[in-house]
Amino acid sequence: MAHETVTGFVDAALRAGASREQVRQALLDAGWSADQIADGLDAFAEVDFVIPVPKPRPQLSARDACRYLVLFVTLYVAAFQLGQLLFAFVNLAVPDDLTHYGEGIYRQIRWSASALIVSYPIFLYVSHRINTEVSADPVRRNAPVRRWLTYLTLFLAAAVLVGDLVSLLFNLLSGELTLRFVLKFTIVAAVAGAIFGYYLWLMKQDDEALRR
């Protein structure tokens, strides 16, 4: 969101007849950052009218907040349970002679599969509904809850990837790089990397659409 002081200045300057470039330069000279200036200018449409015309701003409703929370919570649950399910398969395929899994590992498989079967379709459905509405109304791309939760997801995915790489390097230097560990490292990297890559691409698409 643009700083209110910048937005007010842009409004007054445009009303006085200053060009957008003159406004930008004046704010730069005053010490405002390029992002703050861009947000302030972006609050007004580039249309020919006697006064500055404000752009529509997304309105946050309780329904929108609820849907985005459902979207990202089901994403986190699905991603975690997918990893747990694949970990269990790795444990069965490459057993550890020092560990006896017994019935516990099959209970884990049933639980993870059940959670995945419930959470992933909900994620797909809510995601489809949101994407349909965003395509019809591009202003929704700039909804604060959408951007905050998306950036939070990017942060979490990046943190998991960094932790995964640190764990790989630690085990490599310790001489304990086993097939089981490599398979689990690959699973974590693939799941977190896919989430990070998708939402990074989505944010770029949002930014491009909002600049049009």
Image (cartoon, rainbow, N blue to C red):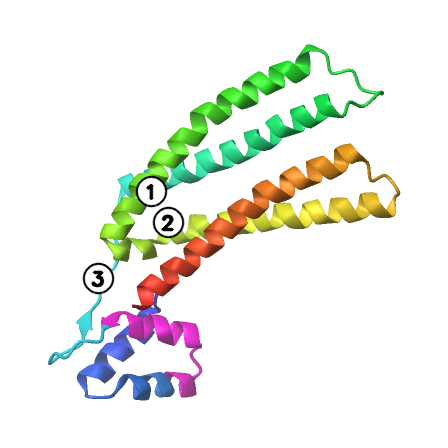
Please indicate whether residue 136 sits to the left or right of residue 37 in the image: left
Residue range (magenta): 27-44
Q: Answer whether labels 1 and 3 touch (C-beta < 8 Å).
A: no
Q: Give the quadrant of residue 70.
A: top left
Q: Most prominent secondary structure in the magenta stretch? A: helix
Q: Which residue does the image show at 72% across and 24% down from the upper left?
A: 93
Q: Is residue 69 magenta?
A: no
Which sits in the foreground, 9 or 191?
191
Q: Amino acid at mark 2?
A: Val
N-term-proximal mark, 2 vs 1: 1
Looking at the figure, which quarter contains the C terminus?
bottom left
Q: Give the quadrant of residue 97.
A: top right
Q: Residues within 10 Å of mark 1 (few under 14, many from 20)?
A: some
Q: Name the residue tied to disc 2.
A: 145
Q: Is residue 6 above or below residue 157?
A: below
Please indicate whether residue 92 sits to the left or right of residue 75 in the image: right
The reply to whether residue 63 is visible in this rendering is yes
N-term-proximal mark, 3 vs 2: 3
Instruction: Calculate the distance from the C-alpha at mark 1 to the C-alpha at mark 3.
Output: 19 Å
Secondary structure at numbered mark 1: helix
Q: Residues within 10 Å of mark 3 (few under 14, many from 20)?
A: few
Instruction: Calculate the distance from the C-alpha at mark 2 to the C-alpha at mark 1.
Output: 6 Å
Q: Name the residue tied to disc 3.
A: 56
Please indicate whether residue 73 sits to the left or right of residue 59 in the image: right
Q: Amino acid at mark 1?
A: Ala
Q: Which residue does the image show at 37% across and 76% down from the upper left?
A: 37
N-term-proximal mark, 1 vs 3: 3
Q: Name the residue tied to disc 1.
A: 65
Instruction: Calculate the distance from the C-alpha at mark 3 to the C-alpha at mark 2.
Output: 17 Å
Q: Amino acid at mark 3?
A: Pro
